[in-house]
Image (spheres, rainbow, N blue to C red):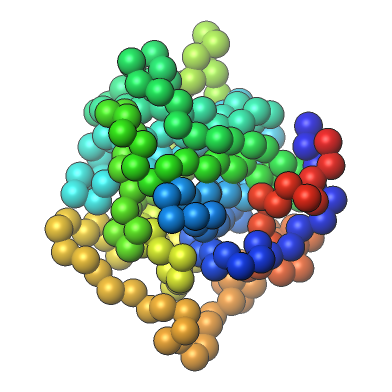
């Protein structure tokens, strides 16, 4: 198990953040022009009693219940795996569908959080991946659940959610819990407030209960993916 001894902002990288329910949040940034890194920060207590946790990235041209998406699912004590589902079916590993695994994933623990990370190319060339384009909107779904007969089981409605975001390094989430309020988009690009254009920011700490925050002092600027500060 990897434990982070010290976290600090990724130097030279402007990152963005999307807030989920249950004290979770998703950070993302671009390590170079061809890749994106996602970090799913989950309060450790949220994982008690669950076997798996996952993310899905879906094109906003599809309706919410299409479930045609690029899935990343991890056992709670392991790392994300690259999966795909088309319709109301359980996500299958890309490699079992004839595709390839195109992610580099890791797992960290820090204070009251478990952090699941993945880095992938924006365009993988795999039929079982969602191509990602900078400055485009996407729907992000999250869920957690249990195994049934050793396989990933269906989650309950209380243990899932979705948000809409713009895949941009200066994207600013204005709501703690969108859940569809600002979407979906179809073929129209929706402008958004860039950080440099906004004078005042409503802080996350003003919107959620203090006990949800763990011991992170600077929730906006701490990133997990810095190899120089990871202890084995």
On the question of residue 181 being in view, the answer is no
Left-right relation of 188 to 76: left
Q: Is residue 73 above or below residue 214?
A: above
Which residue: 24% across, 57% down?
184
Which residue: 60% across, 26% down?
75
Looking at this view, is 95 or 175 the one in front? 95
Looking at this view, is 196 or 73 the one in front? 196
- Residue 53 placement (x, y as % from top left): 55, 34
Left-right relation of 86 to 153: left
Q: Please tell me in which quadrant of the rendered image residue 203 appears.
A: bottom right
Left-right relation of 187 to 193: left
On the question of residue 140 being in view, the answer is yes
Q: Is residue 205 above or below residue 23?
A: below
Q: Please tell me in which quadrant of the rendered image residue 51 appears.
A: top right
Q: In this view, which residue lies farthest toward the left?
A: 187
Looking at this view, is 69 or 30 the one in front? 30
Looking at this view, is 222 or 182 the one in front? 222
Q: In this view, which residue lies farthest toward the front?
A: 33
- Residue 231 placement (x, y as % from top left): 84, 42
Report the quarter where the C terminus lies: top right
Left-right relation of 57 to 42: left
Q: Is residue 131 above or below residue 90?
A: below
- Residue 150 placement (x, y as % from top left): 55, 11
- Residue 209 placement (x, y as % from top left): 65, 65
């Amino acid at each position: 198990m990897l434990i982070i001894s010290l976290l600090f902002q990724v130097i030279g990288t402007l990152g963005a953040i999307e807030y989920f329910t249950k004290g979770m949040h998703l950070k993302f940034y671009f390590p170079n022009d061809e890749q994106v890194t996602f970090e799913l920060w989950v309060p450790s207590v949220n994982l008690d009693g669950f076997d798996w946790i996952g993310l899905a990235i879906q094109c906003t041209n599809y309706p919410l219940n299409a479930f045609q998406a690029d899935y990343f699912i991890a056992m709670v004590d392991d790392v994300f795996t690259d999966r795909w589902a088309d319709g109301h079916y359980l996500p299958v590993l890309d490699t079992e569908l004839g595709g390839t695994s195109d992610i580099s994933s890791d797992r960290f623990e820090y204070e009251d959080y478990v952090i699941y990370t993945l880095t992938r190319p924006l365009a993988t060339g795999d039929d079982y991946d969602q191509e990602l384009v900078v400055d485009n909107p996407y729907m992000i779904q999250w869920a957690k659940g249990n195994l049934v007969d050793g396989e990933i089981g269906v989650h309950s409605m209380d243990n899932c959610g979705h948000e809409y975001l713009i895949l941009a390094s200066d994207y600013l989430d204005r709501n703690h819990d969108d859940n569809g309020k600002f979407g979906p988009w179809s073929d129209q690009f929706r402008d958004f407030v860039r950080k440099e254009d906004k004078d005042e920011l409503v802080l996350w700490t003003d919107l959620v209960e203090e006990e949800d925050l763990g011991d992170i002092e600077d929730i906006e600027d701490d990133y997990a993916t810095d190899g120089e500060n990871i202890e084995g």
